[in-house]
Image: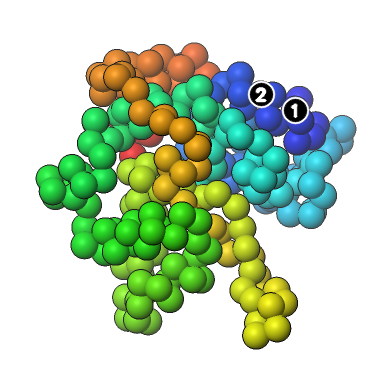
Amino acid sequence: MIKNFGDFCEELLRCGFSLGGGNAKGIFAVIDYDWQAPITEGNPVIWHTGDPETDPWQWRMRVLEERDDIAYAKLFFGTSGYITREWYPYFLAARRNGYDFEDAYENGLISEMEKRVYSAVRDNRRIPSHDLRRLCCFSKEENSRYEKAVTGLQMKMFITICGRARKLNKQGLEYGWDSAVFCTCEEFWGDDISSDISEEEAAEKIRGQVLKLNPSAEEKKIKKFIYG
């Protein structure tokens, strides 16, 4: 049983990846129940209590702020998930298929909106969502397209969440809710995370691990999980 943040990290490193948000979506999640699940006796892990040791909602930022071997972002099925450093190159090989950003754009795999977002993230290294939206000069009418672009770039593994930040007033004081901070995947890992793993080899490696973690996973869902 996962009883605290340390247990969660240990299990995640053993498994290699996990859906976030308390929903396994037919694949796998280290914490496979959400805040709506009934509280069970003897299980201290409960969503949205604010306790950094036992609240999974807090853990998504703790892994980014306290560790250097786990990534968290919108990675699977357009929603949140975790990938460890060990397994990241396999997903990168499957999702990018050897393309860097410019290659992907030239081959029509990146939209104009995604290019605007990626360029702003890359040029600023690490940028909060509220500043990113402002720098890209998105109008209110473009809001849904902006959100889609940010999610798309995370799913294609060109940008990732690297922390959180709040807005600053004229006196330099923080206010409002936290915003996700984004950076490129290369900036996040701080080194070259690419490899010579082929798309086919990567997909088969991930598929094998999924079936090890969840033997009843359906092939259709596994494929979508791998390729995004």
Most foreground residue, 125 or 144: 125
Q: Can you tell which mark lies on residue 11?
A: 2
Outermost residue on the right side: it is: 42
Colour logic: rainbow
Give residue 156's quadrant in the image.
top left
Side of 58 where 86 appears, left or right: left
- Return the x and y of residue 126 as percentages of the image width and height: 50, 56
The residue located at (75%, 46%) in the rendering is 55
Q: Which residue is mark 1?
A: 7
**Which residue is found at the position 26% from the left and 23% from the top?**
199
Q: Is residue 25 left or right of residue 115?
A: right
Amino acid, disc 1: Asp
Mark 2, residues whose alpha carbon is within 10 Å: few (<14), some, or many (≥20)?
some
Are the residues tagged 1 and 2 within 8 Å (C-beta)? yes
Residue placed farthest to the bottom in the image? Answer: 170
Quadrant housing the N terminus? top right
Percent x, y for residue 142?
32, 75
Q: Is residue 114 above or below residue 57?
A: below
Drawn side of residue 11 relative to residue 190, left or right: right
Which residue type does callout 2 highlight?
A: Glu
User: For the residue labelled by badge 2, is the local secondary structure a helix, a strand or a loop?
Assistant: helix
Q: Residue at x 18, y 42 (%)?
A: 103
Query: In which quadrant will I find the C terminus?
Result: top left
Q: Residue at x 35, y 72 (%)?
A: 136
